[in-house]
Structures are given as C-alpha cells and as structure tokens.
Amino acid sequence: MNIVKTEIEGLFIIEPRVFGDNRGYFFESFNARDFKEATGVEVEFVQDNESKSTYGVVRGLHFQNPPYAQSKLVRVVEGEVLDVVVDLRRHSPTFGRHCAVVLSASNHRQFFIPKGFAHGFAVLSDEAIFQYKCDEYYHPEAEGALAWNDPTLSIDWQIAPSSVKLSEKDKNHPKFDSFVTPFE
C-alpha cells in the first residue's frame, strides 16, 4: 500500500496495490500490521458501516463526542464521492481547516480519519456505495455535527447547492463559529 500524507496531521490517503487481469482485480483493503508500520498508528476497528446514496446527497458533517470519538477508515465500492473532514482538535495548528479527497470505486483510495474530526461526503456519481470502519461503536447520545454549508469553512462540495439532498437532521446543524469543540 502507498500512504499519502495530507496537509493535516494524522489524515492519510491509502492507495492499495491492485492486482488485475482479464478476470478482474484483487486488493487487500486493510492490513493492521502494514498500516501500523506505514503510519505509526495502531487501530482496532469494531464496527463496519455501509450506505448507498444518489447524486447530490451530502451526509455530514458528523462526529462522535468524547469519550466515544471514532477513528474511521472510509472507502467507496461503487461510484464516486467527495470525502471531506474538518479538524476539530482545539490545539491543532490546522484547527477549523478542512481536507477533501475524491474516493471512487475506480481509484480504490481510502481515507483514514483519526478522532477529532467532523466527517462528511457528497455523492458525485449517479449512485455511490460508501463503506467505513470505526474503532468505536456508535453512540446516539454522543452525536455531534456541523453545518455542511458553513461559509466559515468554505467547503466546495463540487455540487450546485440547488442539487444538494440532505436528511432532515443534516439541515439544522450549528455553524463552526458557534461551535465549542470537545476535542483537546
């Protein structure tokens, strides 16, 4: 696997070695030993999730508050998304900055997101199947979120705002400037 560091400490793009021939392809989507060796991060995933969405769906920007904060390893198995994270770590030099990565079934890229980040994605293809591993179980009482369209964050979701499809819950999250981060 190839590990690509981003401008934000702790975020990694993972490019697996894909072996293909006339039958199709094979790749190892995660190997804890190799991941730790390449990144220095030891993680134990306890929950896998999957969602299917259509073009224009924006999910996020979500996080789990401590003590139930989650690290995630995300990927797309069908279609294409713009995956976005916002640094919520108060003492980070990149606090409040975001990073965006295109993940698709064809590029096989994955994105490792440590604890302390809000996460969301926008579907850029007709449909997308999105999978992610978490190192902490989901706790509804620990849910947190930020407004996807917060002008302070200036995220280009690569979709016209008039085409964005949101859940009722995602329509009413607080703006970053009124947010008090729980991540030290």
Image: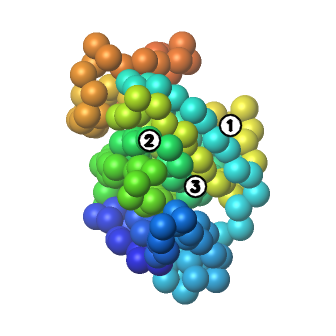
Q: Is residue 48 left or right of residue 51?
A: right
Residue at 38 percent of width and 58 percent of height: 107
- Vertical placement of residue 181 versus 171, above or below: below
Residue 23's place in the image compared with 63, above or below, is below
Whole-percent x, y for residue 79 in the image:
44, 41
Residue 50: horizontal and vertical position, in percent?
64, 41
Pointer 3 local density, CA inside 10 Å: few below 14, some 14–19, many at least 20 = many
- Could you tell me if the residues under marks 1 and 2 are in contact, i.e. CB atoms within 8 Å? no
C-alpha separation, residue under disc 3 versus residue under disc 1: 16 Å
Residue 111 versus residue 177: which sits nearer the camera?
111
Q: Earlier in the sequence, mark 3 or mark 1?
A: 3
Give the residue at x 25% y 34%: 158
Between the residue at mark 1 and the residue at mark 2, the CA separation in whole angstroms equals 30 Å
- Nearer to us of marks 3 and 1 is 3
- Dot label at residue 55: none
Q: Is residue 129 visible?
A: yes
Does residue 154 appear to the left or right of 123 in the view shown? Answer: left
Q: Could you say whether the residue bearing mark 1 is in a helix, strand or loop? A: helix
Instruction: Kindly identify the amino acid type of the residue bearing the numbered disc 1.
Output: Ala
Which residue was labeled with disc 3? 72
Q: At label 3, which amino acid type do we have?
A: Lys
Q: Which residue is at the far bottom?
A: 37
Identify the residue under disc 2.
79
Q: Position of residue 22 (x, y in %)?
A: 48, 67
Q: Residue furthest front?
A: 22
Residue for badge 1: 142
